[in-house]
Image (cartoon, helix red, strand yellow):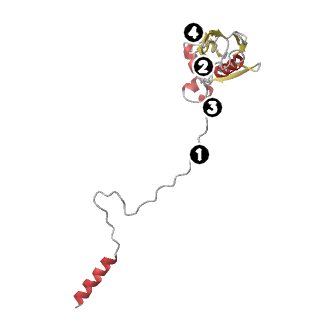
């Protein structure tokens, strides 16, 4: 009699226990996780197109060559050279200032001024040659002189362009002279420190007209 009571008690406990079972190959887990709540995404911000030309921030200067064309009007297609005074001439609209401006800004101005003569004119403008990015390296380098660069360079790159320092150079007394707002700004450059990886902030990017002097 006691044996039957024990069997009935065990059967009752098993029957009352929750059964956790999942079929073969079922990927479910016994403790299902709630799906992550996604936050509402921000509305897309409209970006202003840079136009078909002049995506870079390169500022034009004297000597630069521009290829300018007006769609379906070959008479208004020509190459223009920025004069030393920073301007160039274009048919119908006269002189256009280029110095210190980007190709996109000039393109927009030409389209606006042409609209009275050629309504809805579509202008294409390309910087064909960069001739105004000039730097000077003088003093104790192997090849001093005036250099026309086609890209921005830092002081170390300018020294390499000039053939490197010669044996008599005072390596840690190099200076960069820059004309800004009718004043001359001087940037010191310690060659050994920069090459050793210190004072890297002194290895500045050069600007048009900078003069690197190696005593």
Q: CA distance from mark 2 to mark 1?
A: 54 Å
Disc on the earlier residue, 2 or 1: 1
Query: Which residue is identified by label 3?
Result: 48
Label for residue 171? 2
Q: Is residue 130 left or right of residue 3?
A: right
Label for residue 143? 4
Q: Position of residue 3 (x, y in %)?
A: 22, 87
Q: Secondary structure at mark 2?
A: loop
Disc on the earlier residue, 1 or 3: 1
Vertical arrangement, residue 55 with respect to residue 98, above or below? below
Query: Which residue is identified by label 1?
Result: 42
Name the residue furthest right. 182
In the image, 215 versus 180, the foreground residue is: 180
Disc on the earlier residue, 2 or 4: 4
Q: Position of residue 159 (x, y in %)?
A: 57, 16
Q: CA distance from mark 4 to mark 1?
A: 56 Å
Label for residue 138? none
Q: Is residue 41 left or right of residue 181?
A: left
Choose mark 2 or mark 4, whichever is in front.
4
């Amino acid at each position: 009699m006691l044996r039957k009571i024990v069997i009935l008690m065990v059967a009752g406990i098993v029957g009352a226990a929750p059964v956790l079972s999942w079929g073969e190959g079922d990927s479910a887990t016994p403790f299902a996780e709630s799906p992550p709540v996604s936050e509402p995404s921000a509305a897309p911000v409209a970006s202003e197109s840079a136009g078909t030309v002049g995506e870079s921030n390169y500022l034009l200067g004297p000597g630069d060559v521009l290829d300018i064309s007006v769609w379906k009007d070959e008479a208004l297609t020509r190459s223009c050279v920025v004069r030393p005074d920073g301007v160039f001439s274009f048919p119908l609209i006269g002189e256009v200032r280029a110095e210190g401006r980007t190709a996109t800004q000039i393109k927009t101005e030409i389209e606006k001024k042409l609209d009275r003569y050629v309504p809805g004119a579509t202008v294409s403008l390309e910087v064909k040659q960069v001739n105004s990015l000039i730097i000077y390296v003088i003093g104790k380098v192997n090849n001093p002189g005036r250099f026309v660069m086609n890209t921005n360079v830092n002081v170390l790159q300018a020294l390499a362009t000039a053939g490197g320092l010669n044996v008599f150079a005072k390596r840690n007394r190099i200076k960069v002279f820059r004309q800004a707002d009718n004043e001359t700004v001087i940037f010191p450059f310690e060659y050994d420190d920069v090459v050793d990886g210190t004072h890297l902030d002194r290895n500045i990017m050069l600007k048009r007209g900078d003069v690197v002097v190696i005593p």
